[in-house]
Image (cartoon, grey):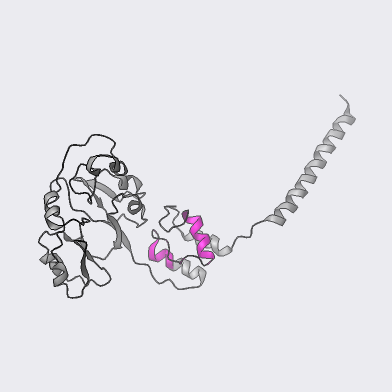
Amino acid sequence: MDIGGILIAAAVVGGAGVIIGIFLGVFGEKFKVEVDEREIKVREQLPGNNCGGCGFAGCDGLAAAIAKGEAAVDACPVGGAPVGKAIGEIMGVSSEGSVHKVAFVKCAGDCEKAKEVYNYYGNEECTAMEFVPNKGSKGCNYGCLGYGSCVKACPFDAIHIVDGIARVDKEKCKACGKCVAVCPRNLIELVPYEANYLVQCNSKEKGKDVMKNCDVGCIGCRLCEKNCPKQAVSVTDNLAHIDTDLCVQCGLCAQKCPKKIITCK
């Protein structure tokens, strides 16, 4: 074996390595992306669930937005007020203290109370019901279908199907909003954790039609609206709704409701 040839080859490889190293160093320095130190610190405070409940593509996206001033310091629904306060200190601003929210299912029509119009056998996905007769086997076209698309979407095991309707565990719910987004009937909403009186119905049918399909649906009688001392209850399209900002938790609406669907959750 020619020693001279080996030395030359080694020198060429070594020289090429040095040149490539210098090139990469210069290239990296020239095109490096400056990372805001605050972004790194903010990211360290975020819980890392990457649930998307904040409206950004995961915790990295939210951290970048907060550092740029494009998102509120308390924008993380999972972290809540404690995380918002910690991030506020990093950003040098005060956190206004986000309201602790949880998901609420606007339906009380369980297997016993909601009428079935036929027996369904097939793909058990709420989103598939758009393509079956009556848009589901239940007579009410506004209530919970009970097939658990929301259950599958929840990353916190906070929602389950019980007696044919979705029920939320307030203590586990992080208000990420994934169940809200996936429900094809738009009957899940985020409400304050402290809100005690809420309407467990989503039907906009007239009272007589509601009673045909469900024993506990809102019939739009307006007794709740008429008896509320703070005008926190309004009836629109035959359906009562409670403004949680105005509600003082007196409970009069629940007492007067003849269908007992204003519930203390």
Question: Which of these two is toward me, 234 or 162?
Answer: 234
**Residue 121 drawn at (x, y percent):** 23, 34
Measuring 14% from the left and 65% from the top, which residue is drawn there? Answer: 254
- In this picture, is 201 found above or below 98? above
- In this picture, is 120 found above or below 32? above
Q: Outermost residue, bottom direction?
A: 229
In the picture, the quarter occupied by the N terminus is top right
**Residue 195 drawn at (x, y percent):** 25, 65
Q: Is residue 41 left or right of residue 132?
A: right
**Residue 74 drawn at (x, y percent):** 42, 66
Residue bounds of the magenta highlight: 58-84
Asked whether residue 125 appears in the rendered view, the answer is: no
Magenta stretch holds residue 82: yes
Q: Is residue 142 left or right of residue 224?
A: right
Asked whether residue 92 appears in the rendered view, the answer is: yes
Q: Is residue 198 left or right of residue 175?
A: left
